[in-house]
Image: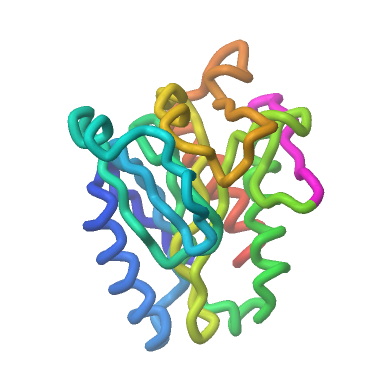
Amino acid sequence: MNVQHWGLLDFNTAWDKQRELARAVEQGEPDTLVLCEHPDVITLGRATKNGAVIASIAELTASGVSVVDIDRGGEATIHNPGQLVGYPIMNLQRTKPDLHWFLRTVEQCIIDALREFDVEGGRVDGRTGVWIENDRKICAIGFHCRSWITTHGFALNVCNNLDLFNAIIPCGITDKGVTSLQNECSTPPSMVDVEDKITMAFRRYFE
């Protein structure tokens, strides 16, 4: 599995690059895990309901926050600097052509990585992503899959500004909050350390 580090990259540019990678993987290139960050953006998945964006478009535009409709599953979420975004561009026919298995394995990768920083993540029945104590979401997950090639992925809050989540109903959930590694760790890790632990977990489960 290849790993690519894209740094801080505009969301739409990254989406174009994902599609290029997906075509290459479909044609036989190795699976690739992309790690990056994005400037402030709200992305709306296929299941997004009316009213998911609370702030007005005028307010968001004035604050430099873009809103993008995309083809992944799930609802509205936030990407902003300090959040580690991971795009596993993978051909599941090489591992296991089962989206449920893939989703749960990605969740497990995140849970394992968090444990390296003495943070105990877990799952909430009926909801995707990784949670702290069942009431604070630390990692959102949503995929698109075509011909068993996956795009999009996970968004792990490391040291990002969580105030931006007030502009939306995150993942359509009104009864739980969001958190970050910065909030959960006595000594917050660096982004490089988080990337290393995530990479180790993905190699363990997918190679």
- In the displayed structure, would residue 50 be above or below residue 54? below
Residue 82: name its quadrant.
Answer: top left
The foreground one among 68 and 54 is 54
Q: Position of residue 12 (x, y in %)?
A: 25, 56
Q: How is the image coloured?
A: rainbow
Q: How many marks?
A: 0
Q: Position of residue 62 (x, y in %)?
A: 18, 30
Please say whether residue 202 is one of the residues in the magenta stretch.
no
- In the displayed structure, would residue 76 be above or below residue 131? below
**Is residue 185 toward the left or the right of residue 16 in the image?**
right
**Is residue 182 toward the left or the right of residue 6 in the image?**
right
Q: Position of residue 70 (x, y in %)?
A: 38, 62
Give, as a single range, the part of the protein colored magenta: 116-125
For image coordinates 49% across by 66% down, the residue present is 1
For image coordinates 77% across by 28% down, the residue present is 133
Residue 37: name its quadrant.
Answer: top left
- In the displayed structure, would residue 22 be above or below residue 44? below
Overall secondary structure of the magenta section: loop
The foreground one among 58 and 76 is 58
Q: Residue furthest right?
A: 125
Q: Position of residue 194 (x, y in %)?
A: 51, 35
Please say whether residue 122 is one of the residues in the magenta stretch.
yes
For image coordinates 81% across by 49% down, the residue present is 125
For image coordinates 29% across by 49% down, the residue present is 6
